């Protein structure tokens, strides 16, 4: 059985594992206050072209989202998100569990527009009972989105502008950021993110690490007391160095981008195979998630040998599904799937 | 200036004020443990035809909603509501502030259907990552709704059935319940509510009282420790008897329904006047809220003498607005408005 | 049965009830945005000698405490309180229910000292794992305290100084403030409170009103968006004018202090009677709460005719109890109790 | 520099690292639903002598505490803990951040007694305003405690009895459980814990793992929907197998106890050295944490070569400090410290 259903089916990139082994019995202080975390933070600052960023390492994405959002909002404030946003759908209400409403708006291929933010903001401030409504204070976007799509430079600039104009924080969930930056239609880079977001994170769990997300805080207001929030939300790893070691490895010698490019190459190869079969896509995108609409009969044949995830029913005999590649995807497995596809 | 913008512009019905005066300097124990509260609870049980109901008196609607919902749900559970539901829009995220997600679904004239509940429930339990999503556990409806519409017997029976089948609590917000029960198209009564809901409340604030909502708990599971929640949410009135006295007055001699019928008579008279002018309605309903779609020019003329509330823009020269009547609406004021309308 | 167990056994002062009657059928806007609330706020500003105060009217004390505290603190911050503080003991964990720890320290007769605050603050900032601990950000005191004692000018000045030095908010719960200001050993007045606290409230529920607490915000940081919090915590009364009318009545013509002085006169008379019987006091104080330590046999005799509240067991045959007077206490009832005491 | 300040200064036991390497590129499903987690759970059930236990793997201790407590309590309920309990002091108010009060009582060497629980419970139920107080529903203990002390069989039996009698859940934090079970004065074992607790956890982070705590749920009531809580609190590791692999390794071939015994042997050796120097101990215990009271002059000499943690000031020239050993402590380092101690 070859699994394509997600991008966290394997462990970590071998170079990370080596580093873990090398350092395993060395002693270091706990809770992220070690030399590895410091160096990893410096490498990330350098990659972002800004040495005044605060970088914190958290174990996972839900943890990162809830910690950032709760640290940013007062009790009466909410976060605007596309309805398809991970925080709105797939985190068991973590944001609400900390007291904040997710102000969900309709999405287009997983994306939110500056115009939607502007409209929601204006409708709030011009409502005579605005105090009876949750005050919007943050905008949450993911890049790549849950549908594997990307924000263009222009889209992100506009979102950033509307946020700054209305004193809203712009927060980007980058759980799959590497796969976005490596995509053929990508227009962004880390320095651009550090200029346009107030806070974002660089995903490790899905991009080569055993686990870990590097939260990058740009806005001074959000830096204060952030470590209290990490601890309170249960996210402060005792052996914090494990996070430092992993991000150090990913951000020296460009490993992060190198392995991201591999995943994209595998995805494009697979995408081409679906296209050749004449399958349309639920969403057009160029990142590591592929959403072909396929005949159920074909899916049934494949399902004995390949894992994929079910997305939605399209009609009586077709379903949209998701195939993911990752840093760990073996080309031979992709070839095998392509071959079997041809024979279906 | 004559106000029609809401149903809480005056104090209380004179009979309530009399009773407040009579009892003013009598001593009684605090926190709702007095003879007036006990008697009011008995009268309400009697009106509901069920003497095993737990009845608690709270000061206001947001308080009642948040207390009931937080008492019913565990942290990972959410409440299904029409998108237009008061808890979803106009309570500054009170439900979320206590940790629970409002699972909003599209509404039709403010209403939610059993089919929508069924669909949301099924999509939850059949999703392979159901544990990554908020678990639906309660259904919130309002009757009359925020658009002044009513649930039919059949609609409520179906909602009740789907809730019981899937172990969901059915909660009805009755902030304007009197105006619903008195409407010409009403099919419900208190015993029917007590049979089909797990918990509901009978609104006093908008129906004759200075303030106060009587929460009626039917389901045994929801009765336990409810007073702890009232206190914790800041809703336990020291002089709880004020609530008892008011509901005692409303529920002996049918005062609650008598004054509700007055409001409806006033509303129907006014509604007829709008209809005669040829104004369509944003929503068709027969309760105390009227939503005519009117030329802005007419609204402008009226606005010097009459208060109403703005609902939404319909086109370049028309707006939907809201006029409310209540137990306190003077017929002479309605006549005056009708007269002025004719001359517009 | 004559009740002395608390100071909220009756309704409201007759002048308040009159005003309620007079205004009952007049129309006014809802949610505290009416002329009565505005005027009441102005009268309170005037009494405090400061016209830049933000004054908000809430229904009850727990509501006021939780709203002020949640509006002031971020999630990782806590409020320092005497262990005996109302928020720590008798509000069903309302503060914790909103996510904040009450940092309780031992009390002396219900009071907290500047030295205790200083020590807790220093121990926090000098602990190497300070980020693993709740950050102190507010100091909560009550005046009179739960034991009926008062802060002297010097004590409050010192608390204020240590708070300002360490950027802590000083919050005073004045649920019984009138009875403090009217006591013979009182050294404070409203302008002094407005100079030394960041926020405090003037209790109405226990001092002549049907219900209501006037929250006075001095510190600019705490003023922002406060009404969102009132609404979110369920404390925004639809007919907000009821609060305005009551505080208007209490703060024109000095009614608030006049009725407070009555309660104190009654308390002193009763206190003297206990003293003459040779009963010691659990706590020495001069406000409206009296805590005599009495033989159980005497208590038993009295309990057929008089209500009091049980405080704590002192030895095998003595208990400390509480007798309260209030604005509504009839001198004849006090005389009757004194007479019966003499005969025990 | 040789670090003795905590038991998480190194990575993981070499056998765990080997297993991580071996499995690194194998594919498995995410979120703890893999074969390693299943097998690890079975091994733990077996070690506990009970195959109906629910075992869940979480990343860290604060995460485990907050998840278990929030899953167990309704909003108005609190958890009784020794004042020194980790949840009360060193988790940045995580429990309160989820809405629950920690009902702290004075500790004796870090321990809580059945009598204290009984007293708190009784004082709650017999207080006439019990509904104004947080309802006790869970008892939290740690074993070893924060002071390295242990509960005897009798103490735990009594705690268990009082909890069952009053329908309180008994929860044991076993972050250092191995070091407790391996101590010379230990009377407990896993089957005994599974009989007497409702839920407990077996710490991995401090006992040989890179990270990880195995939560063992005994009480059926606490099993329901537990994975929703893990996800909501941000504790569901995408590559959950990492936890499974580690606990599998620790619980086959008795590795967990073997390495725990090593830590205890090192601790006893070091403890003996302090004793020989005539240093008293802040607390007497036999686990891996040692709390000698030492002259500041000696501490100063050692501090260039050895890390320890500061506990509290004892007098002008003495401090209580903490030295920890662990599974990773090298005997040569202990010898070196002992040698240097002798020469001080």
Image: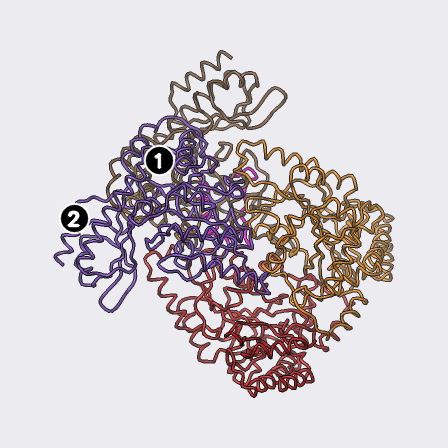
Chain colours: A red, B purple, C brown, D orange
Which residue lies at the image location 69% right of the left edge and 69% below the top edge? A35
Q: Would you place residue D246 above or below residue A154 in this image? A: above
Residue C173 position, x and y percent, is: 46, 41
Tell me the quarter of the image containing the C terminus of chain B.
bottom left
Mark 2 or mark 1, earlier in chain: 1
Query: Does residue A52 show up?
Result: no
Which residue reaches farthest bottom? Answer: A276
Q: Which mark is residue D332?
A: none
Residue of label 2:
B335
Judged from the image, the secondary structure of the residue bearing numbered disc 1 is helix
Residue D98 position, x and y percent, is: 56, 52
Along the viewing direction, whichever of C189 and A100 lies nearer the viewer: A100
Chain ID for label 2?
Answer: B
Residue A308 sits in quarter? bottom right
On whether residue D163 falls in the magenta region, the answer is no
B203 vs A225, left or right, is left
Along the viewing direction, whichever of A317 and B183 lies nearer the viewer: A317
Chain ID for label 1?
Answer: B
* Number of numbered discs: 2
Q: Would you place residue C340 above or below residue B117 in this image? A: above
Judged from the image, the secondary structure of the residue bearing numbered disc 2 is helix
Q: CA distance from mark 2 to mark 1?
A: 30 Å
Residue B215 sits in quarter? top left
D326 vs C336, left or right, is right
Residue of label 1:
B251
> How many residues crowd mark 2 within 10 Å: few (<14), some (14–19), many (20+)?
some
Residue A265 sits in quarter? bottom right
Q: Which residues are magenta?
A: C61-86
Residue C171 position, x and y percent, is: 47, 45
Residue A223 position, x and y percent, is: 54, 64
């Amino acid at each position: 059985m070859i699994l394509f259903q997600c991008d966290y089916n394997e462990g970590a990139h071998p170079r990370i594992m080596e580093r873990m082994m090398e350092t395993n019995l060395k002693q270091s202080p706990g809770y992220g206050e070690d030399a590895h975390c410091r160096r990893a933070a410096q490498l990330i600052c350098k990659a972002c072209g800004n040495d005044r960023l605060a970088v914190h390492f958290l174990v996972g994405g839900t943890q990162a989202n809830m910690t950032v959002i709760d640290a940013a909002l007062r009790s009466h404030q909410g976060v605007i998100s596309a309805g398809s946003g991970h925080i709105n759908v797939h985190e068991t209400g973590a944001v609400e569990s900390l007291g904040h409403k997710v102000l969900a708006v309709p999405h287009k291929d997983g994306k939110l527009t500056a115009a939607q933010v502007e409209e929601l903001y204006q409708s709030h401030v011009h409502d005579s009972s605005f105090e009876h409504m949750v005050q919007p204070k943050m905008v949450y976007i993911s890049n790549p989105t849950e549908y594997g799509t990307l924000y263009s430079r222009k889209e992100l600039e506009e979102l950033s502008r509307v946020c700054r104009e209305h004193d809203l924080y712009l927060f980007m969930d980058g759980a799959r950021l590497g796969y976005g930056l490596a995509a053929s239609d990508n227009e962004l880079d880390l320095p651009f993110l550090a200029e346009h977001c107030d806070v974002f994170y660089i995903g490790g769990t899905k991009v080569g690490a055993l686990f870990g997300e590097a939260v990058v805080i740009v806005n001074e207001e959000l830096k204060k007391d952030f470590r209290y929030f990490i601890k309170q939300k249960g996210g402060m790893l005792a052996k914090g160095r494990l996070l430092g070691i992993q991000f150090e490895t990913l951000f020296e010698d460009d490993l992060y981008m190198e392995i991201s490019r591999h995943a994209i190459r595998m995805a494009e190869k697979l995408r081409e195979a679906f296209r050749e079969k004449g399958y349309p896509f639920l969403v057009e995108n160029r990142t590591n998630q592929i959403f072909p609409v396929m005949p159920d009969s074909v899916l049934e044949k494949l399902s004995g040998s390949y894992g994929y995830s079910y997305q939605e029913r399209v009609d009586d005999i077709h379903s949209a599904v998701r195939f993911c590649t990752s840093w760990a995807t073996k080309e031979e497995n992709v070839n095998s799937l392509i071959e079997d596809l041809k024979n279906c």
